[in-house]
Image (tube, rainbow, N blue to C red):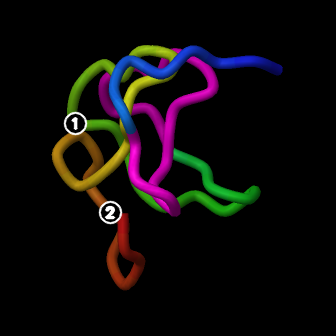
Amino acid sequence: MAVTLAITISLGHKIARCGIGLDERIVKYGVPIGSATAHIARGEHVHVHNVRGFAGQPA
């Protein structure tokens, strides 16, 4: 699946492969890591500025 990035993303950072709604669960490698604090568009950077991590898990 090809995704066009909205900005340059550093190696190791996450991008959204599909749109993510407010408060929707963020899943990385099949494991829930947090929820969206804002709408995240497909191809957008997914990081601490738009994810609230679950207790004990980094976003």
Instruction: Give the residue furthest to the right.
Output: 1
**Quadrant the C terminus occupies:** bottom left
On whether residue 58 falls in the magenta region, the answer is no
Q: Identify the residue shown where x is 58% and y is 58%.
A: 32
Count up the numbered dots: 2
Q: What residue is disc 1 on?
A: 37
Tell me which corner region of the image, top left, top right, bottom left or bottom right, holds residue 8.
top left
Residue name at image x 49 percent, y 58 percent: 11
| Rendered location of residue 2, percent (x, y) | 75, 18
Query: For the residue labelled by badge 2, is the local secondary structure a helix, a strand or a loop?
Result: strand
| Residue 15 in the image: above or below residue 42 | below
Whether residue 42 sits left or right of residue 41 in the image: it is right
Instruction: Give the x, y percent position of residue 18.
Output: 60, 19
x, y (%) of residue 41? 41, 15
Query: Quick check: 57 left or right of 18?
Result: left
* Real-space CA distance between mark 1 and mark 2, rounded to the nearest whole angstrom: 10 Å
Q: Look at the picture and state if 25 lies above or below 40.
A: below
Residue 16 in magenta stretch? yes
Residue at 41% x, 77% y is: 57
Q: Which residue is mark 2?
A: 53
| Main SS class of the magenta portion in the image | loop
The amino acid marked with disc number 1 is Thr
Q: What is the secondary structure assignment of the residue under circle 1?
A: loop
Task: Work out whether 22 lies above or below 58.
Answer: above
Magenta-drawn segment: 9-25
Depicted 49 relative to depicted 17: above or below:
below
Amino acid type at circle 2 is Gly
**Quadrant of the rendering where the N terminus is positioned:** top right
Upstream in sequence: badge 1 or badge 2: 1
- Name which quarter of the figure residue 9 lies in: top left
